[in-house]
Amino acid sequence: MINSTQVDNSPLLNDDCDTDANGGPPGSMHPWHNPTCSCQKYFSDLSSSFTPTFLAWMAMVQLCVSGGARRLTMVMSLPLFKGLGIDASRKQLYMAVMYSPFAMKALIGVLSDLVPVCGYNKRYYAVLSILVGVLCSSFLLGANGYVRDAMSHGQAAARVLCDFIIVCFTGIAFQDATLDILNEGKYSELMRISPQSGSSIITFKEGFYALGAIFTQSYVGPLSDSDQWDVLFWILVVVVAREETIRQ
């Protein structure tokens, strides 16, 4: 029989985020024991090392461009190629071309460090990449009306259309790769200034990327199965152009 005096009646959680259930400092309690306080502490530490403007910019890049546009072009391209009758070897060539800007990330980073534009190392490189992405995504709206026509006009017409679409996708990937490497350089610089921030910004970045990727995966399949390419192209324009609005 258990003696009632030996039973610990202290609450598992403490409403006060300054102490744990035993009155100790919050660091002595596992984060999962009180997720609310852990989140408060995480965002407090994050905001003490990074400005709200930078965090908003980082969130939009990961949510709309990396998690949105990158995932959208990758997932949408496969059913689009299949519908246009593109063979596997040509698909591989298209994918290699489409993601070639990511192979140039290091070059873009070095160029931005060595050749500042109007006194800024990153700003105008980011602006240029956004303009390229918006322009290429806008061109896709013009190609939308030819998708169904190309499907019925034979292999030659389908290849010409796919070549054009891949050029546009490559421009969008250039925006994605450029913003990604510029963001990495900026938050690495801020992490050196505030080493106490640890890896909090990496968690923030990957979290918003995952949110964007999950949301994108949820609608691309149904829309591509119903051949609603116009809707997908419009979504691509919106998520790419969103970076221009947050920059302003």
Image: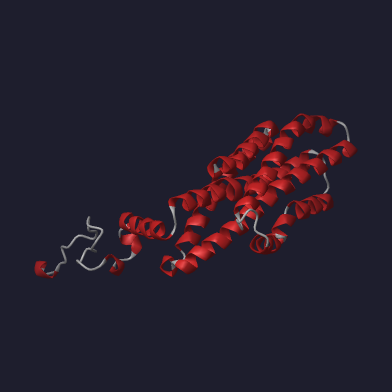
Type of colouring: secondary structure
Q: Is residue 62 in view from this perspective?
A: yes
Nearer-the-camera pick, 119 or 167: 119
Residue at 49% from the left image edge and 63% from the top image edge: 190
Nearer-the-camera pick, 238 or 53: 53
Q: Residue furthest front?
A: 118
Quarter of the N terminus within the rendering: bottom left
Horizontal and vertical percent position of residue 131: 67, 43
Horizontal and vertical percent position of residue 60: 53, 47
Q: Is residue 123 above or below residue 158?
A: below
Horizontal and vertical percent position of residue 54: 49, 53
Which corner quadrant of the image does residue 30 belong to?
A: bottom left
Is residue 106 shown left or right of residue 161?
Answer: left
Number of dots carrying numbers: 0
Which corner quadrant of the image does residue 108 belong to?
A: bottom right
Is residue 2 shown left or right of residue 172?
Answer: left
Is residue 128 shown left or right of residue 163?
Answer: left
Residue at 69% from the left image edge and 61% from the top image edge: 111
Horizontal and vertical percent position of residue 220: 63, 40
Q: Is residue 235 above or below residue 96?
A: above
Q: Is residue 227 in view from this perspective?
A: no
Residue at 64% from the left image edge and 49% from the top image edge: 70
Quarter of the C terminus within the rendering: top right
Nearer-the-camera pick, 47 or 26: 47
Nearer-the-camera pick, 77 or 11: 77
Residue at 74% from the left image edge and 56% from the top image edge: 100
